[in-house]
Image (cartoon, rainbow, N blue to C red):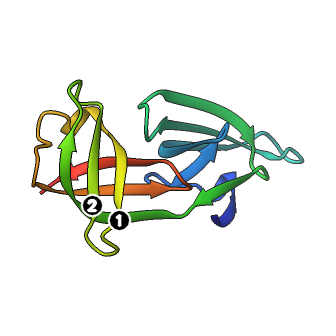
Amino acid sequence: MVLKVIDATECRTGTVIIIDGQPCTVKSVDVSKTGKHGASKCRIEASEIFTGKKKITAVPGSTRFDVPLVEKKRGQVLSVAEDRSTASIMDLDSFETLDVKIMEEVKNDVEVEKQVEYWDIEGPKAIMRVF
């Protein structure tokens, strides 16, 4: 579910937008106006949330971007896969169990019975922080 749609000129640092079907966090935005009758151009530098890949796109200022709904939820780790890429967690609000990807930054901190924060962005989920 898309939360809202914004123009490229409205993007700010830290905004989460959809680029090429992937949720990305905006790192920087450069807006330039070409001339007296020219339309503005935006150069947006962003990184994918789940893979960390850097994306740079240059678009007209009137280009519309989807802003996804980012749900930040808490859960408790039930088990961790041997390769430490995924974990089985229990949501602390609904008590449902989920298999969730573990982000590289927190891979070594995730242990059984620890509480974690996971993000649900338009379906895909990932553990972002350990408490």
Query: Which mark, by number, is residue 90?
Result: 2
Q: In this view, does 50 lie to the left or right of 65?
A: left
Q: Which of 24 and 73 is in front in this view?
A: 73
Give how far across and how far down residue 33 sits, in percent. 73, 44
Q: In which quarter of the image is residue 67?
A: bottom right
Q: Which of 44 and 47 is in front in this view?
A: 47
Q: In this view, does 66 lie to the left or right of 88?
A: right
Residue flagged by tag 2: what amino acid is it?
A: Met
Query: Which mark, by number, is residue 52?
Result: none
Give how far across and how far down residue 62 sits, in percent. 79, 53
> How far is disc 2 from disc 1 in space, using C-alphas?
6 Å
Disc 2 secondary structure class: strand
Q: Are marks 2 and 1 in contact (CB under 8 Å)?
A: yes
Query: Which mark, by number, is residue 96?
Result: 1
- Neighbours of disc 2 within 10 Å: few (<14), some (14-19), many (20+): many
The quadrant of the image that shows the N terminus is bottom right
Residue flagged by tag 1: what amino acid is it?
A: Glu
Label total for image = 2
Residue closest to the far right:
37
Q: In this view, does 126 lie to the left or right of 131?
A: right
